[in-house]
Image (spheres, grey):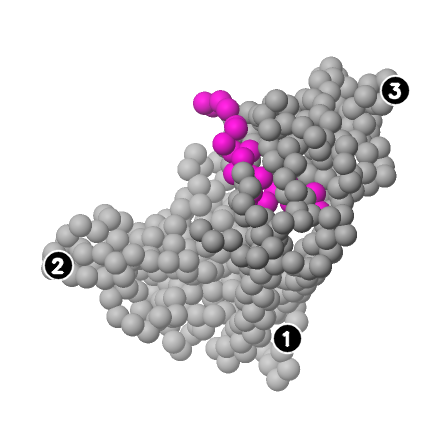
Amino acid sequence: MKLSPGYKQTEVGVIPEDWTVVPFQQLLDFRNGINADRRAYGRGMPFINVFEIISKGHLKAQDIPGRVSIDKKSMESYLVRRGDIVFNRSSETQDEVGLSSVYLDDAPAVFGGFVIRGQCKQALDPVYSGYAFRAPVIRTQMVARGQGAIRANIGQSDLKQIHALLPSLDEQRAIAEALSDADALIESLYQLITKKRQIKQGAMQELLTGKRRLPGFSGGWEVKCLNELAEIDPEQLSSNTQPDYEFKYISLEDVDFGALRGHSLQVFDSAPSRARRRLRIDDLLVSTVRPNLKSHLWFRDRSANWVCSTGFSVVRCFESLSHPGYVFAHLFAEGVSKQIDALLTGSNYPAINSRDVRQLQIPVPKLEEQAAIATVLSDMDTELTALESRLAKARQIKQGMMQALLTGRIRLL
């Protein structure tokens, strides 16, 4: 393969000519973590363990929940300083073995026995290392060196053989700044989504109970069971269904907290035995298996030949009495959640049945007010969906940036 001008072939791939490939043995001094007496844990100074490393590429003291009480000599031996890199030496999966985080704090912390600390011997920007050491070019080497049938392990001797790609210190800093900006955008979107979800939750609590009324509405509300407002499990595929009948099937696994993640095409003769409940537009699918997970769905597709699992109870609202969007919102609200929790209490298996669904109670205003409330909450959902889409796109862009910047395919200097 012909190389582009300014690039060279190395043992870890094609990189810019002015970059170097450095084995960790030349880059870092390693030390295994402390194994304190079990009575020492739960108090004392921050104690970095495996979970924090798996969760974050850049660590601060506030990210470390663990505590350990040790003597001064041990603290000095196992201290983690700003810029030190900590590696996960043992994992339940190969994919997580050797994951690393860089410590970006001046507060003292130590590291545990399932962790290896690396202290820099060469010029290495700490923020850059937090990204670079989790990049595919490093992770591929780590996973290949992980050992163990039950748990994946990696030791200092293996870490020393890992090869890192190093641009100049100035370029390291430029790459770190670009990726940090991408992370800042991701974090700001995540925080905004969290805030919007809290606002929606508060609006649900007020609007679905009548505590707050929308302009133009008054009058009393009634508490009704779902079977007074809707038909439950109205249509089923019978045993006489034509064997070659084709349909689109929604299983329990296809629904996640109000969202349809997928479906499968089935033929009745070979379809799962649970594929029995026929669907129409605006049907509500109430998950009766682990209902506390709230894997419910407002079905909005107008096309024909849809069927869902008997793991759902199908609620078909009476048009003159209830609005599907209003009833659907209640499936995620506190009142229905408490009723479902009460039904599950003492049960060996977290499930309810269609009889239970029929008896679930919700407060109900007139149909026009139901529709208005449903519109307000739906608009909030639309805004949240748009923000979540932006967040997913931002994460995707960051992944592309990492792949391009950390291999030198795109240069910033």
Q: Is residue 124 above or below residue 98?
A: below
Element type where label 1 sits in the image:
loop
Q: CA distance from mark 2 to mark 1?
A: 51 Å
Q: CA distance from mark 2 to mark 3?
A: 76 Å
Label 3 crowd (10 A; few <14 / some 14-19 / many >=20) = few
The three-letter amino acid code for the residue at tag 1 is: Arg
Q: Which residue is mark 1?
A: 213
Q: Which residue is mark 2?
A: 244
Left or right, 403 with reference to 285: right
Q: Which mark is residue 10?
A: none
Which SS type dominates the magenta stretch? helix
Q: Earlier in the sequence, mark 2 or mark 3?
A: 3
Q: Which residue is mark 3?
A: 72
Q: Residue furthest bottom?
A: 216
Visible in this render: residue 195?
no
Label 1 crowd (10 A; few <14 / some 14-19 / many >=20) = some
The three-letter amino acid code for the residue at tag 2 is: Asp
Say which of marks 2 and 3 sits in front: 3
Please tell me which residue is depicted at 49% across the width and 56% down the height of the picture: 257
Q: Position of residue 66 (x, y in %)?
A: 73, 31
Left or right, 116 with reference to 45: left
Q: Position of residue 358 (x, y in %)?
A: 39, 57
The range drawn in magenta is 128-150
- Total labels: the figure holds 3
Please tell me which residue is depicted at 18% across the width and 55% down the height of the picture: 268
Please tell me which residue is depicted at 73% across the width and 27% down the height of the picture: 29
